[in-house]
Image (cartoon, helix red, strand yellow):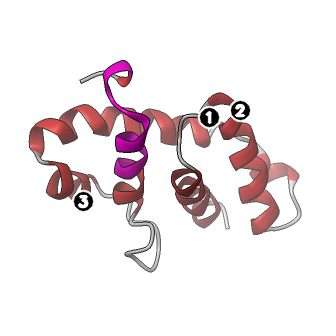
Amino acid sequence: MDAVSVPAELLSEAVLTWTGWGRTTWPAQDERLVIERFGNERAAGLLPMIRQLEDDFYRSDARFATADLAEMGDAAAAEFRIRHPEVSDAAVRALAWCYTFDYK
């Protein structure tokens, strides 16, 4: 399974699952959640893509250049959105949630 053969909706759903968005009190970033939701074989293809998206989101230096968490998340999300327009708004919000949680 490579990024070309994975529908954007599926990858976005995998990001939401991995982060725990809407299900956990704080970001889970848990591979087991993806395995439980999508099965071992599909998760094995999705997890490297999720990690790549996470790495790309965390490339942002918004944590150094903003006044508060909301602004930080918005700035990092805007940078990420330029590189990854295919990722759903909800998945971008979930990655911003992780980013701001880690850099609060």
The kind of secondary structure the magenta stretch mainly shows is helix
- Look at the image and say whether residue 68 sits in the magenta stretch: no
Q: Position of residue 61 (x, y in %)?
A: 75, 42
Describe residue 8's horizontal placement relative to residue 102 as left or right. left
Residue 19 circle label:
none
Describe residue 6's horizontal placement relative to residue 97 as left or right. left
Note whether 53 is above or below 20 in the view shown: above
Magenta segment boundaries in residue numbering: 4-14
Note whether 73 is above or below 10 in the view shown: below
Whether residues under marks 2 and 1 lie with C-beta atoms below 8 angstroms apart, the answer is yes
Q: Residue at x 58, y 63 (%)?
A: 97
Frontmost residue, 30 versus 45: 45
Judging by the rendered image, the residue that carries numbered circle 3 is 33
Classify mark 1: residues with Cα within 10 Å, few (<14), some (14-19) or many (20+): few
The answer to which of marks 1 and 3 sits earlier in the sequence is 3
Residue 82 circle label:
2
In which image quadrant can residue 70 be found? bottom right
